[in-house]
Protein backbone atom coordinates (compact mmCIF):
# COMPACT_ATOMS: atom_id res chain seq x y z
CA UNK A 1 0.00 0.00 0.00
CA UNK A 2 1.55 3.28 -1.06
CA UNK A 3 1.88 6.05 1.50
CA UNK A 4 -0.84 8.62 1.34
CA UNK A 5 0.08 12.08 0.08
CA UNK A 6 -1.27 15.48 0.83
CA UNK A 7 -2.65 15.73 -2.71
CA UNK A 8 -5.09 12.88 -2.20
CA UNK A 9 -8.67 13.71 -1.30
CA UNK A 10 -9.63 13.44 2.33
CA UNK A 11 -13.18 12.03 2.42
CA UNK A 12 -15.26 13.30 5.27
CA UNK A 13 -16.63 10.87 7.85
CA UNK A 14 -20.31 10.00 7.80
CA UNK A 15 -22.92 9.17 10.43
CA UNK A 16 -21.75 5.57 10.75
CA UNK A 17 -18.22 6.73 11.56
CA UNK A 18 -19.43 9.08 14.29
CA UNK A 19 -21.58 6.35 15.83
CA UNK A 20 -18.50 4.11 15.62
CA UNK A 21 -16.55 6.74 17.53
CA UNK A 22 -19.16 6.59 20.29
CA UNK A 23 -18.72 2.81 20.40
CA UNK A 24 -14.93 3.19 20.67
CA UNK A 25 -15.43 5.62 23.55
CA UNK A 26 -16.84 2.78 25.69
CA UNK A 27 -13.64 0.74 26.11
CA UNK A 28 -11.59 3.93 26.22
CA UNK A 29 -13.46 5.23 29.26
CA UNK A 30 -13.41 1.84 30.92
CA UNK A 31 -9.70 1.20 30.45
CA UNK A 32 -8.79 4.49 32.09
CA UNK A 33 -11.41 4.05 34.80
CA UNK A 34 -9.93 0.69 35.77
CA UNK A 35 -6.57 2.35 36.33
CA UNK A 36 -7.78 4.75 39.02
CA UNK A 37 -10.95 3.12 40.35
CA UNK A 38 -8.99 1.41 43.13
CA UNK A 39 -7.51 4.61 44.56
CA UNK A 40 -10.46 5.19 46.89
CA UNK A 41 -11.20 1.48 47.19
CA UNK A 42 -7.72 0.69 48.50
CA UNK A 43 -8.53 1.13 52.22
CA UNK A 44 -11.58 -1.16 51.86
CA UNK A 45 -9.57 -3.67 49.85
CA UNK A 46 -6.78 -3.58 52.43
CA UNK A 47 -9.27 -4.35 55.19
CA UNK A 48 -10.72 -7.27 53.24
CA UNK A 49 -7.57 -8.95 51.91
CA UNK A 50 -4.93 -7.58 54.31
CA UNK A 51 -2.20 -7.07 51.69
CA UNK A 52 1.26 -5.81 52.65
CA UNK A 53 2.35 -2.33 51.56
CA UNK A 54 4.32 -3.83 48.68
CA UNK A 55 1.31 -5.89 47.59
CA UNK A 56 -0.87 -2.77 47.71
CA UNK A 57 1.49 -1.07 45.29
CA UNK A 58 1.45 -4.10 43.00
CA UNK A 59 -2.37 -4.19 43.06
CA UNK A 60 -2.45 -0.55 42.00
CA UNK A 61 0.35 -0.66 39.44
CA UNK A 62 0.35 -4.08 37.77
CA UNK A 63 -2.60 -3.16 35.55
CA UNK A 64 -0.88 -0.14 34.02
CA UNK A 65 2.48 -1.87 33.78
CA UNK A 66 1.07 -4.88 31.92
CA UNK A 67 -0.77 -2.57 29.53
CA UNK A 68 2.47 -0.69 28.89
CA UNK A 69 4.44 -3.91 28.51
CA UNK A 70 2.12 -5.41 25.89
CA UNK A 71 1.04 -2.30 23.98
CA UNK A 72 3.81 -2.48 21.38
CA UNK A 73 3.11 -6.16 20.78
CA UNK A 74 -0.65 -5.73 20.53
CA UNK A 75 -0.41 -2.65 18.32
CA UNK A 76 1.63 -4.60 15.79
CA UNK A 77 -0.60 -7.65 16.16
CA UNK A 78 -3.66 -5.54 15.37
CA UNK A 79 -1.98 -4.30 12.20
CA UNK A 80 -1.59 -7.94 11.17
CA UNK A 81 -4.81 -9.71 12.14
CA UNK A 82 -7.17 -6.72 12.01
CA UNK A 83 -7.86 -4.01 14.56
CA UNK A 84 -11.56 -4.78 14.98
CA UNK A 85 -10.83 -8.48 15.47
CA UNK A 86 -8.24 -7.69 18.14
CA UNK A 87 -10.72 -5.31 19.79
CA UNK A 88 -13.34 -8.05 20.03
CA UNK A 89 -10.84 -10.60 21.39
CA UNK A 90 -9.62 -8.15 24.00
CA UNK A 91 -13.15 -7.24 25.10
CA UNK A 92 -13.98 -10.92 25.66
CA UNK A 93 -10.95 -11.54 27.84
CA UNK A 94 -11.53 -8.25 29.71
CA UNK A 95 -14.97 -9.47 30.79
CA UNK A 96 -13.57 -12.78 32.08
CA UNK A 97 -10.69 -11.13 33.94
CA UNK A 98 -13.02 -8.53 35.50
CA UNK A 99 -15.23 -11.20 37.01
CA UNK A 100 -12.19 -13.07 38.34
CA UNK A 101 -10.80 -9.88 39.93
CA UNK A 102 -14.13 -9.05 41.57
CA UNK A 103 -14.15 -12.34 43.45
CA UNK A 104 -10.43 -12.58 44.27
CA UNK A 105 -9.91 -14.03 47.75
CA UNK A 106 -6.23 -13.22 48.29
CA UNK A 107 -3.78 -10.42 47.42
CA UNK A 108 -1.89 -12.77 45.11
CA UNK A 109 -5.05 -13.68 43.19
CA UNK A 110 -6.02 -10.02 42.83
CA UNK A 111 -2.56 -9.11 41.54
CA UNK A 112 -2.74 -11.96 39.00
CA UNK A 113 -6.20 -11.00 37.76
CA UNK A 114 -5.23 -7.33 37.54
CA UNK A 115 -2.28 -8.43 35.40
CA UNK A 116 -4.67 -10.32 33.09
CA UNK A 117 -6.85 -7.22 32.90
CA UNK A 118 -3.79 -5.26 31.83
CA UNK A 119 -2.96 -7.72 29.05
CA UNK A 120 -6.56 -7.59 27.82
CA UNK A 121 -6.48 -3.80 28.02
CA UNK A 122 -3.35 -3.74 25.88
CA UNK A 123 -5.31 -5.39 23.06
CA UNK A 124 -7.99 -2.69 23.22
CA UNK A 125 -6.02 0.56 23.42
CA UNK A 126 -4.10 0.61 20.11
CA UNK A 127 -7.15 -0.79 18.33
CA UNK A 128 -9.36 2.15 19.36
CA UNK A 129 -6.95 4.91 18.35
CA UNK A 130 -5.81 3.27 15.10
CA UNK A 131 -9.44 2.64 14.07
CA UNK A 132 -10.12 6.35 14.61
CA UNK A 133 -7.15 7.14 12.38
CA UNK A 134 -8.57 4.99 9.59
CA UNK A 135 -12.18 6.14 10.02
CA UNK A 136 -11.48 9.90 9.97
CA UNK A 137 -9.40 11.10 7.02
CA UNK A 138 -10.39 14.76 7.04
CA UNK A 139 -7.82 16.69 9.15
CA UNK A 140 -10.32 18.72 11.15
CA UNK A 141 -12.61 15.77 11.76
CA UNK A 142 -9.70 13.58 12.80
CA UNK A 143 -8.37 16.24 15.16
CA UNK A 144 -11.79 16.50 16.79
CA UNK A 145 -12.14 12.70 16.97
CA UNK A 146 -8.74 12.34 18.63
CA UNK A 147 -9.70 15.06 21.13
CA UNK A 148 -12.93 13.17 21.90
CA UNK A 149 -10.95 9.93 22.31
CA UNK A 150 -8.48 11.53 24.69
CA UNK A 151 -11.29 13.29 26.57
CA UNK A 152 -12.94 9.93 27.15
CA UNK A 153 -9.67 8.37 28.27
CA UNK A 154 -8.87 11.30 30.57
CA UNK A 155 -12.41 11.45 31.92
CA UNK A 156 -12.40 7.73 32.65
CA UNK A 157 -9.24 8.03 34.71
CA UNK A 158 -10.45 11.17 36.44
CA UNK A 159 -13.92 9.92 37.39
CA UNK A 160 -12.64 6.48 38.37
CA UNK A 161 -12.15 7.43 42.04
CA UNK A 162 -15.58 9.12 42.14
CA UNK A 163 -17.35 6.14 40.62
CA UNK A 164 -15.41 3.81 42.87
CA UNK A 165 -16.43 5.88 45.87
CA UNK A 166 -20.10 5.76 44.94
CA UNK A 167 -19.99 2.01 44.38
CA UNK A 168 -18.32 1.50 47.76
CA UNK A 169 -21.21 3.24 49.48
CA UNK A 170 -23.49 0.27 48.73
CA UNK A 171 -21.33 -2.67 47.62
CA UNK A 172 -18.15 -4.52 48.53
CA UNK A 173 -14.79 -3.54 47.00
CA UNK A 174 -14.92 -6.22 44.30
CA UNK A 175 -17.94 -4.56 42.70
CA UNK A 176 -15.71 -1.87 41.18
CA UNK A 177 -14.39 -4.48 38.73
CA UNK A 178 -17.86 -5.53 37.61
CA UNK A 179 -18.49 -2.05 36.18
CA UNK A 180 -16.69 -3.10 33.02
CA UNK A 181 -18.77 -6.19 32.29
CA UNK A 182 -21.91 -4.52 30.78
CA UNK A 183 -19.74 -1.97 28.92
CA UNK A 184 -17.68 -4.67 27.21
CA UNK A 185 -20.75 -6.77 26.44
CA UNK A 186 -22.29 -3.75 24.68
CA UNK A 187 -19.08 -3.33 22.69
CA UNK A 188 -19.13 -6.99 21.67
CA UNK A 189 -22.71 -6.60 20.41
CA UNK A 190 -22.32 -3.34 18.49
CA UNK A 191 -18.68 -3.43 17.36
CA UNK A 192 -19.04 -5.93 14.49
CA UNK A 193 -21.95 -3.90 13.08
CA UNK A 194 -20.61 -0.36 13.43
CA UNK A 195 -16.82 -0.65 13.22
CA UNK A 196 -14.94 -1.30 9.98
CA UNK A 197 -12.01 -3.69 9.77
CA UNK A 198 -8.51 -2.52 8.89
CA UNK A 199 -5.18 -4.32 8.71
CA UNK A 200 -1.84 -4.08 6.95
CA UNK A 201 -2.09 -5.96 3.62
CA UNK A 202 1.67 -6.73 3.69
CA UNK A 203 2.58 -6.95 7.39
CA UNK A 204 5.74 -9.03 7.13
CA UNK A 205 6.78 -11.65 9.68
CA UNK A 206 5.75 -11.26 13.31
CA UNK A 207 8.76 -10.77 15.61
CA UNK A 208 8.09 -13.25 18.42
CA UNK A 209 11.62 -12.92 19.78
CA UNK A 210 11.11 -9.17 19.88
CA UNK A 211 8.00 -9.69 22.00
CA UNK A 212 10.07 -11.70 24.47
CA UNK A 213 12.80 -9.05 24.53
CA UNK A 214 10.34 -6.21 25.10
CA UNK A 215 8.84 -7.96 28.12
CA UNK A 216 12.28 -9.01 29.40
CA UNK A 217 13.31 -5.35 29.25
CA UNK A 218 10.22 -3.84 30.88
CA UNK A 219 9.42 -6.30 33.67
CA UNK A 220 12.82 -6.19 35.47
CA UNK A 221 12.68 -2.40 35.46
CA UNK A 222 9.17 -2.56 36.93
CA UNK A 223 10.28 -5.01 39.61
CA UNK A 224 13.25 -2.81 40.48
CA UNK A 225 11.13 0.29 41.02
CA UNK A 226 8.48 -1.60 42.95
CA UNK A 227 10.99 -3.29 45.24
CA UNK A 228 12.88 -0.04 45.85
CA UNK A 229 9.61 1.77 46.63
CA UNK A 230 8.81 -0.79 49.32
CA UNK A 231 12.25 -1.67 50.70
CA UNK A 232 14.66 0.99 49.38
CA UNK A 233 17.39 0.43 46.82
CA UNK A 234 19.64 -2.58 47.37
CA UNK A 235 21.76 -4.87 45.24
CA UNK A 236 18.80 -6.87 43.88
CA UNK A 237 16.68 -4.01 42.47
CA UNK A 238 19.77 -2.24 41.13
CA UNK A 239 20.83 -5.42 39.32
CA UNK A 240 17.32 -5.87 37.92
CA UNK A 241 17.25 -2.27 36.70
CA UNK A 242 20.60 -2.63 34.95
CA UNK A 243 19.54 -5.95 33.39
CA UNK A 244 16.31 -4.44 32.08
CA UNK A 245 18.14 -1.48 30.57
CA UNK A 246 20.72 -3.72 28.89
CA UNK A 247 18.00 -5.95 27.40
CA UNK A 248 16.13 -2.83 26.33
CA UNK A 249 19.23 -1.59 24.50
CA UNK A 250 19.53 -4.94 22.73
CA UNK A 251 15.82 -4.83 21.83
CA UNK A 252 16.18 -1.37 20.28
CA UNK A 253 19.30 -2.36 18.35
CA UNK A 254 17.60 -5.46 17.00
CA UNK A 255 14.48 -3.53 15.96
CA UNK A 256 16.61 -1.19 13.87
CA UNK A 257 17.91 -4.13 11.84
CA UNK A 258 14.50 -5.65 10.97
CA UNK A 259 12.38 -4.90 7.91
CA UNK A 260 9.15 -5.50 9.90
CA UNK A 261 9.92 -4.43 13.49
CA UNK A 262 7.56 -4.27 16.42
CA UNK A 263 8.50 -0.60 16.79
CA UNK A 264 9.18 1.66 13.82
CA UNK A 265 12.19 3.35 15.38
CA UNK A 266 12.80 5.46 12.30
CA UNK A 267 10.08 7.77 13.61
CA UNK A 268 12.37 8.76 16.45
CA UNK A 269 14.69 10.42 13.93
CA UNK A 270 12.14 13.23 13.89
CA UNK A 271 12.97 15.66 16.67
CA UNK A 272 9.32 16.58 17.18
CA UNK A 273 8.38 12.91 17.58
CA UNK A 274 11.12 12.17 20.13
CA UNK A 275 10.65 15.31 22.20
CA UNK A 276 6.89 14.91 22.09
CA UNK A 277 6.90 11.35 23.40
CA UNK A 278 9.55 12.14 26.02
CA UNK A 279 7.48 15.07 27.28
CA UNK A 280 4.37 12.91 27.31
CA UNK A 281 6.14 10.28 29.43
CA UNK A 282 7.39 12.78 32.02
CA UNK A 283 4.10 14.66 32.09
CA UNK A 284 2.13 11.52 32.86
CA UNK A 285 4.68 10.50 35.52
CA UNK A 286 3.69 13.57 37.51
CA UNK A 287 -0.01 13.02 36.77
CA UNK A 288 0.07 9.39 37.94
CA UNK A 289 1.52 10.33 41.31
CA UNK A 290 -0.87 13.27 41.68
CA UNK A 291 -4.04 11.23 41.07
CA UNK A 292 -3.10 8.70 43.75
CA UNK A 293 -1.90 11.24 46.34
CA UNK A 294 -4.86 13.56 45.84
CA UNK A 295 -7.32 10.71 46.40
CA UNK A 296 -5.45 9.67 49.56
CA UNK A 297 -5.31 13.26 50.81
CA UNK A 298 -9.07 13.67 50.52
CA UNK A 299 -9.90 10.35 52.12
CA UNK A 300 -7.12 9.82 54.67
CA UNK A 301 -6.08 13.34 55.70
CA UNK A 302 -9.40 15.18 55.41
CA UNK A 303 -11.27 11.98 56.38
CA UNK A 304 -13.96 12.36 53.73
CA UNK A 305 -16.00 9.27 52.94
CA UNK A 306 -15.47 7.70 49.49
CA UNK A 307 -18.50 9.36 47.89
CA UNK A 308 -17.52 12.83 49.18
CA UNK A 309 -13.92 12.40 48.09
CA UNK A 310 -15.08 11.25 44.67
CA UNK A 311 -17.30 14.30 44.24
CA UNK A 312 -14.39 16.62 45.06
CA UNK A 313 -12.52 15.00 42.17
CA UNK A 314 -15.23 15.84 39.62
CA UNK A 315 -13.89 19.37 38.86
CA UNK A 316 -10.56 18.10 37.59
CA UNK A 317 -12.34 15.50 35.46
CA UNK A 318 -14.39 18.25 33.82
CA UNK A 319 -11.26 20.40 33.43
CA UNK A 320 -9.51 17.53 31.68
CA UNK A 321 -12.32 17.17 29.16
CA UNK A 322 -12.52 20.92 28.49
CA UNK A 323 -8.76 21.16 28.05
CA UNK A 324 -8.66 18.26 25.60
CA UNK A 325 -11.42 19.74 23.46
CA UNK A 326 -9.85 23.23 23.40
CA UNK A 327 -6.30 22.08 22.67
CA UNK A 328 -6.68 21.71 18.87
CA UNK A 329 -8.27 25.17 18.60
CA UNK A 330 -5.47 26.72 20.66
CA UNK A 331 -2.83 24.99 18.56
CA UNK A 332 -4.39 26.36 15.36
CA UNK A 333 -3.95 29.89 16.70
CA UNK A 334 -0.52 29.88 18.36
CA UNK A 335 1.06 26.59 17.03
CA UNK A 336 1.20 23.21 18.73
CA UNK A 337 4.56 23.60 20.55
CA UNK A 338 3.55 26.95 22.05
CA UNK A 339 0.19 25.56 23.14
CA UNK A 340 1.94 22.65 24.86
CA UNK A 341 4.47 24.95 26.59
CA UNK A 342 1.74 27.32 27.79
CA UNK A 343 -0.27 24.41 29.16
CA UNK A 344 2.75 23.06 31.04
CA UNK A 345 3.24 26.42 32.76
CA UNK A 346 -0.42 26.33 33.85
CA UNK A 347 0.11 22.80 35.17
CA UNK A 348 3.18 23.98 37.11
CA UNK A 349 1.02 26.57 38.89
CA UNK A 350 -1.45 23.80 39.73
CA UNK A 351 1.25 21.58 41.18
CA UNK A 352 2.46 24.53 43.25
CA UNK A 353 -1.00 24.89 44.78
CA UNK A 354 -1.14 21.13 45.35
CA UNK A 355 2.17 21.30 47.21
CA UNK A 356 0.71 23.88 49.59
CA UNK A 357 -2.17 21.82 50.98
CA UNK A 358 -2.05 20.93 54.66
CA UNK A 359 -3.99 19.09 57.31
CA UNK A 360 -6.17 22.11 58.04
CA UNK A 361 -6.46 23.76 54.64
CA UNK A 362 -9.58 21.92 53.47
CA UNK A 363 -10.18 20.66 49.92
CA UNK A 364 -10.47 24.03 48.11
CA UNK A 365 -6.77 24.61 47.43
CA UNK A 366 -6.17 21.05 46.33
CA UNK A 367 -9.21 21.06 44.02
CA UNK A 368 -8.10 24.34 42.43
CA UNK A 369 -4.66 22.90 41.86
CA UNK A 370 -6.14 19.74 40.35
CA UNK A 371 -8.17 21.77 37.84
CA UNK A 372 -5.07 23.67 36.69
CA UNK A 373 -3.01 20.49 36.48
CA UNK A 374 -5.36 18.53 34.24
CA UNK A 375 -6.27 21.56 32.12
CA UNK A 376 -2.60 22.41 31.60
CA UNK A 377 -1.56 18.87 30.67
CA UNK A 378 -4.35 18.45 28.10
CA UNK A 379 -2.54 20.15 25.16
CA UNK A 380 0.49 17.92 25.71
CA UNK A 381 -1.60 14.76 25.56
CA UNK A 382 -3.86 15.69 22.65
CA UNK A 383 -1.27 17.25 20.37
CA UNK A 384 1.40 14.60 20.88
CA UNK A 385 -1.10 11.87 20.02
CA UNK A 386 -2.08 13.74 16.87
CA UNK A 387 1.60 14.12 15.97
CA UNK A 388 2.21 10.39 16.37
CA UNK A 389 -0.73 9.11 14.33
CA UNK A 390 -0.14 11.59 11.50
CA UNK A 391 3.55 10.69 11.22
CA UNK A 392 3.01 7.08 10.16
CA UNK A 393 1.31 5.42 7.16
CA UNK A 394 -2.22 4.29 7.90
CA UNK A 395 -1.30 0.60 7.61
CA UNK A 396 1.15 1.15 10.50
CA UNK A 397 -1.13 3.30 12.67
CA UNK A 398 -1.68 0.52 15.22
CA UNK A 399 2.03 0.27 15.90
CA UNK A 400 2.45 4.07 15.92
CA UNK A 401 -0.46 4.73 18.26
CA UNK A 402 0.83 2.08 20.66
CA UNK A 403 4.02 4.12 21.13
CA UNK A 404 2.15 7.13 22.51
CA UNK A 405 -0.08 4.93 24.64
CA UNK A 406 2.94 3.07 25.99
CA UNK A 407 4.40 6.38 27.13
CA UNK A 408 1.12 7.38 28.77
CA UNK A 409 0.52 4.11 30.58
CA UNK A 410 4.13 3.65 31.61
CA UNK A 411 4.23 7.23 32.83
CA UNK A 412 1.09 6.86 34.96
CA UNK A 413 2.37 3.67 36.55
CA UNK A 414 5.93 4.95 36.99
CA UNK A 415 4.51 8.05 38.66
CA UNK A 416 3.17 5.89 41.49
CA UNK A 417 6.40 3.87 41.70
CA UNK A 418 8.81 6.83 41.58
CA UNK A 419 7.23 10.06 42.78
CA UNK A 420 4.88 8.02 44.96
CA UNK A 421 7.97 6.40 46.48
CA UNK A 422 9.40 9.86 47.18
CA UNK A 423 6.30 10.79 49.15
CA UNK A 424 6.48 7.48 51.03
CA UNK A 425 10.15 7.98 51.85
CA UNK A 426 9.50 11.48 53.23
CA UNK A 427 6.59 10.17 55.29
CA UNK A 428 8.61 7.33 56.80
CA UNK A 429 11.62 9.49 57.63
CA UNK A 430 9.47 12.06 59.47
CA UNK A 431 7.21 9.58 61.28
CA UNK A 432 10.06 7.40 62.53
CA UNK A 433 11.33 10.02 64.99
CA UNK A 434 8.08 11.72 66.00
CA UNK A 435 5.72 8.94 67.05
CA UNK A 436 4.22 9.47 70.53
CA UNK A 437 5.61 7.51 73.47
CA UNK A 438 3.55 4.68 74.88
CA UNK A 439 2.61 3.36 71.46
CA UNK A 440 2.62 -0.48 71.26
CA UNK A 441 5.29 -1.97 69.01
CA UNK A 442 2.78 -3.41 66.53
CA UNK A 443 1.03 -0.04 66.22
CA UNK A 444 4.39 1.72 65.85
CA UNK A 445 5.40 -0.59 63.00
CA UNK A 446 2.08 -0.11 61.21
CA UNK A 447 2.25 3.68 61.57
CA UNK A 448 5.77 3.80 60.18
CA UNK A 449 4.73 1.83 57.11
CA UNK A 450 2.01 4.14 55.73
CA UNK A 451 -0.74 6.60 56.63
CA UNK A 452 -3.27 3.81 56.18
CA UNK A 453 -1.38 1.84 58.83
CA UNK A 454 -1.30 4.85 61.14
CA UNK A 455 -5.07 5.30 60.87
CA UNK A 456 -5.58 1.64 61.76
CA UNK A 457 -3.16 1.89 64.68
CA UNK A 458 -4.91 5.01 65.99
CA UNK A 459 -8.22 3.16 65.98
CA UNK A 460 -6.67 0.36 68.03
CA UNK A 461 -4.99 2.47 70.73
CA UNK A 462 -7.54 5.28 71.14
CA UNK A 463 -7.32 8.26 73.52
CA UNK A 464 -4.78 11.08 73.44
CA UNK A 465 -2.08 8.80 72.07
CA UNK A 466 -4.25 8.19 69.01
CA UNK A 467 -4.76 11.94 68.50
CA UNK A 468 -1.01 12.58 68.69
CA UNK A 469 -0.34 9.70 66.33
CA UNK A 470 -2.82 11.00 63.75
CA UNK A 471 -1.44 14.54 63.92
CA UNK A 472 2.10 13.27 63.38
CA UNK A 473 1.17 10.88 60.57
CA UNK A 474 -1.02 13.37 58.69
CA UNK A 475 1.63 16.08 58.97
CA UNK A 476 4.27 13.72 57.62
CA UNK A 477 2.01 12.70 54.74
CA UNK A 478 1.30 16.29 53.64
CA UNK A 479 5.02 17.06 53.83
CA UNK A 480 5.68 14.13 51.51
CA UNK A 481 2.88 15.38 49.26
CA UNK A 482 4.54 18.82 49.16
CA UNK A 483 7.85 17.24 48.12
CA UNK A 484 6.12 15.47 45.23
CA UNK A 485 4.32 18.68 44.27
CA UNK A 486 7.48 20.78 44.11
CA UNK A 487 9.30 18.10 42.12
CA UNK A 488 6.39 18.14 39.68
CA UNK A 489 6.63 21.93 39.38
CA UNK A 490 10.29 21.56 38.39
CA UNK A 491 9.44 18.90 35.80
CA UNK A 492 6.66 21.03 34.28
CA UNK A 493 8.82 24.13 33.95
CA UNK A 494 11.70 22.15 32.44
CA UNK A 495 9.36 20.53 29.91
CA UNK A 496 7.82 23.90 29.06
CA UNK A 497 11.27 25.29 28.28
CA UNK A 498 12.25 22.27 26.18
CA UNK A 499 9.04 22.24 24.15
CA UNK A 500 9.14 26.01 23.57
CA UNK A 501 12.74 25.94 22.35
CA UNK A 502 13.10 22.61 20.56
CA UNK A 503 9.71 21.11 19.68
CA UNK A 504 8.75 21.83 16.09
CA UNK A 505 5.93 21.00 13.72
CA UNK A 506 6.62 17.76 11.81
CA UNK A 507 6.72 19.57 8.45
CA UNK A 508 9.55 21.79 9.70
CA UNK A 509 11.29 18.82 11.28
CA UNK A 510 11.21 16.76 8.08
CA UNK A 511 12.29 19.69 5.89
CA UNK A 512 15.48 20.31 7.87
CA UNK A 513 18.20 18.89 5.54
CA UNK A 514 20.84 18.96 8.26
CA UNK A 515 18.68 16.86 10.57
CA UNK A 516 17.91 14.41 7.76
CA UNK A 517 21.59 14.03 6.89
CA UNK A 518 22.51 13.54 10.54
CA UNK A 519 19.82 10.89 10.93
CA UNK A 520 21.03 8.95 7.90
CA UNK A 521 24.64 9.14 9.01
CA UNK A 522 23.74 8.05 12.55
CA UNK A 523 21.72 5.09 11.25
CA UNK A 524 24.53 4.03 8.97
CA UNK A 525 27.26 4.20 11.60
CA UNK A 526 25.14 2.58 14.32
CA UNK A 527 24.28 -0.59 12.42
CA UNK A 528 27.16 -0.61 9.95
CA UNK A 529 25.31 -1.43 6.66
CA UNK A 530 27.02 -1.21 3.33
CA UNK A 531 26.04 1.47 0.85
CA UNK A 532 24.08 -1.09 -1.14
CA UNK A 533 22.21 -2.18 1.96
CA UNK A 534 21.43 1.42 2.82
CA UNK A 535 20.04 2.00 -0.68
CA UNK A 536 17.96 -1.15 -0.40
CA UNK A 537 16.62 0.00 2.94
CA UNK A 538 15.62 3.34 1.45
CA UNK A 539 13.91 1.64 -1.46
CA UNK A 540 11.80 -0.54 0.86
CA UNK A 541 11.09 2.08 3.50
CA UNK A 542 7.79 3.20 2.01
CA UNK A 543 6.35 -0.27 2.46
CA UNK A 544 7.68 -0.69 5.99
CA UNK A 545 6.52 2.62 7.41
CA UNK A 546 10.02 4.21 7.55
CA UNK A 547 9.51 7.88 8.34
CA UNK A 548 12.69 8.78 6.43
CA UNK A 549 11.55 7.06 3.25
CA UNK A 550 8.09 8.58 3.36
CA UNK A 551 9.08 12.06 4.47
CA UNK A 552 8.95 13.52 0.99
CA UNK A 553 5.34 12.47 0.69
CA UNK A 554 4.32 13.51 4.20
CA UNK A 555 5.04 17.21 4.42
CA UNK A 556 1.85 18.24 6.15
CA UNK A 557 1.67 18.93 9.90
CA UNK A 558 -0.23 16.65 12.29
CA UNK A 559 -3.80 16.11 11.29
CA UNK A 560 -3.34 17.44 7.74
CA UNK A 561 -3.31 14.18 5.83
Image: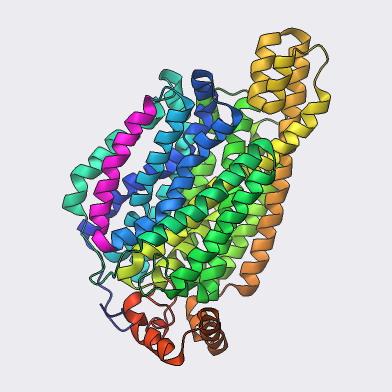
Image location (x, y in percent) of residue 293? 62, 37
Residue at 68% x, 16% y is: 457
Residue at 54% x, 25% y is: 51
16 left or right of 306 in image = left
Magenta extent = 80-103
Please check the rendered image and state whether residue 91 is part of the magenta-colored stretch, yes or no.
yes
Residue 75 higher or lower than 46, as above or below: below
Question: Where, by quadrant of the figure, is residue 172 drawn?
Answer: top left
Answer whether residue 405 is visible to the viewer in this image: no
Q: Quadrant of the C terminus?
A: bottom left
Please check the rendered image and state whether residue 393 is part of the magenta-colored stretch, yes or no.
no
Question: Where, by quadrant of the figure, is residue 132 drawn?
Answer: bottom left
Residue at 35% x, 33% y is: 98
Image location (x, y in percent) of residue 122? 38, 50
Q: Quadrant of the N terminus?
A: bottom left
Residue situated in front as seen by the camera: 447 or 371: 447
Answer whether residue 283 is visible to the viewer in this image: yes
Amino acid sequence: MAPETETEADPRAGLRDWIGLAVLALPTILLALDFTVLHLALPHLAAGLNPSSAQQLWILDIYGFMIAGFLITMGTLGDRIGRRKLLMIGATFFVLASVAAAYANSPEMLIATRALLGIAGATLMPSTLSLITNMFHDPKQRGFAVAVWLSCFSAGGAVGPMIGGLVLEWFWWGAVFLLGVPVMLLLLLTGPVLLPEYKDPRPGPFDLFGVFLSLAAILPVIWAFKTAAAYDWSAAPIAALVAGLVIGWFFVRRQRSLESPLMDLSLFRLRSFSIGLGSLLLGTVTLGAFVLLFAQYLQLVLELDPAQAGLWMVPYAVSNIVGAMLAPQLASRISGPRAIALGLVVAAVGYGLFAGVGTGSGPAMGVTGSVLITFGLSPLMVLVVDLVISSAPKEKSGSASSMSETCSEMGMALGVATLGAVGTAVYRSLVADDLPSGLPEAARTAAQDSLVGALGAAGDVGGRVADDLLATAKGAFTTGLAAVGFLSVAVMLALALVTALFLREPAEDEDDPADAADALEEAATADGPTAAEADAGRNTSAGSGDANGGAAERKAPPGSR
